[in-house]
Image (cartoon, rainbow, N blue to C red):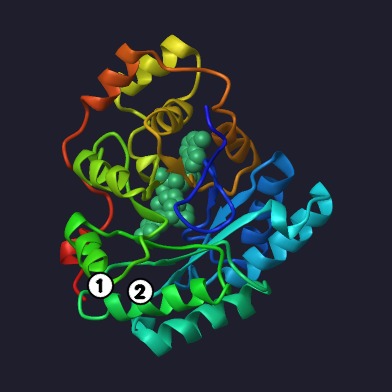
Amino acid sequence: MKQSIQLNHGQKAIPTIGLGVFKVKDGDTVMDAVVEAIRQGYRHIDTAAVYENEEGVGDGIRKGMEIANISREDLFITSKLWNADQGYDAAISAYEASLVRLGLEQLDLYLIHWPVEDKMVESWRALETLYREGRVGAVGVSNFQIHHLETLDANSDLVPAVNQVERHPLLRQTELASYMSEHGIVPVAWAPLMQGGLFEEQTLVEVAKEVDRSVAQVLLRWHLQTGWVIIPKSIKPHRIAENFNVLNFELTKDQMERIDSLDRYQRVGPDPDDFGF
Ligand code: NAD
């Protein structure tokens, strides 16, 4: 099982398990979660300007580096361009503002958070400039459907390094994943635990019993075995540990197929084609 995946551009590989920090607005709480994750061995943190916690994440990164005795190069930090800041100049300014809030010199990955149809090409040009000028490690997108990726492809030579989308057994994203695989775009799963909505699901409970693991661990292992990067969110130390402890067991082909069969194109988050921009 790979612990990181090389991206189609940039120097750093993306660690396959990261910590998500959506909805953790309190500065001390997010700082503590980031410190705990780094202490436990996480090397990848996923935030966004709209989460309003970049300052706390930055504090956690500095404190975590000190406690774990690692350097900035050892970490992979992602943030995202919010919809209101799309467009060329606004995107450059938004990236700079994220760096100031995080207290970092550069990010390892900067994503367009959602595909704002009339602005995403200009936003992508801005991210491309940031990358070509060496101001960001790699650039990518989030919540892009195939047709959004095709629009970028028609307008730019730089292929997004990743596409971060909602993904869990009820929304396997098979067509999108095939397109991304053909184009060398690494798939990153948000809501990999379906935001907690699958813990009672019978097939998952059965598989969890069979492998003597929690349903959360089965879900995360399923993502990894299908080649996806995961960014589960938790602020509780024991869950942060549980979610990281998924590299030392394996689901069989039969167990994988039973989980695959739960797919029914069901989202917990917004539909990228109907976000109400
Ligand atoms: P998630 O699937 O990671 O679920 C988080 C929920 O599960 C929380 O309520 C948490 O308390 C609970 N949980 C976590 N570990 C658990 C465990 N081991 N046992 C029991 N419960 C557990 O959902 P998410 O936070 O929406 O997604 C993960 C990350 O993805 C976010 O934090 C964020 O960084 C990112 N994200 C990105 C987008 C996007 O548009 N790009 C959207 C949503 C989230």
Residue 106 found in image quarter: bottom right
Residue 200 picture quarter: top left
Q: Is 151 located above or below residue 69 in the figure?
A: below
Local crowd size for mark 1, using a 10 Å CA cut-off: few (<14), some (14–19), many (≥20) = few
How far from the left and from the top, in percent, is residue 71? 77, 56
SS of the residue under disc 2? helix
Query: Badge 2: how crowded within 10 Å, few (<14), some, or many (20+)?
Result: many
User: Mark 1 or 2, which is nearer the eye?
Assistant: 1
**Residue assigned mark 1:** 155
- x, y percentage for residue 141? 36, 62
Pointer 1 or 2: first along the chain: 2
Indicate whether 1 appears above or below 133. Answer: above
The residue lying at 63 percent from left, 80 percent from top is 100
The residue lying toward the viewer, choosing from 7 and 47, is 7
Residue 265 quadrant = top left
Q: Which mark is residue 225?
A: none
Left or right: where 66 falls relative to 154 = right
What residue did someone put label 2 on?
A: 124
Q: Are marks 1 and 2 in contact (CB under 8 Å)?
A: yes
Q: Residue furthest bottom?
A: 89
Point 58% across, 56% down: residue = 11
Image coordinates for residue 261, horizontal then vertical, percent: 21, 24
Q: Is residue 73 above or below residue 49?
A: above
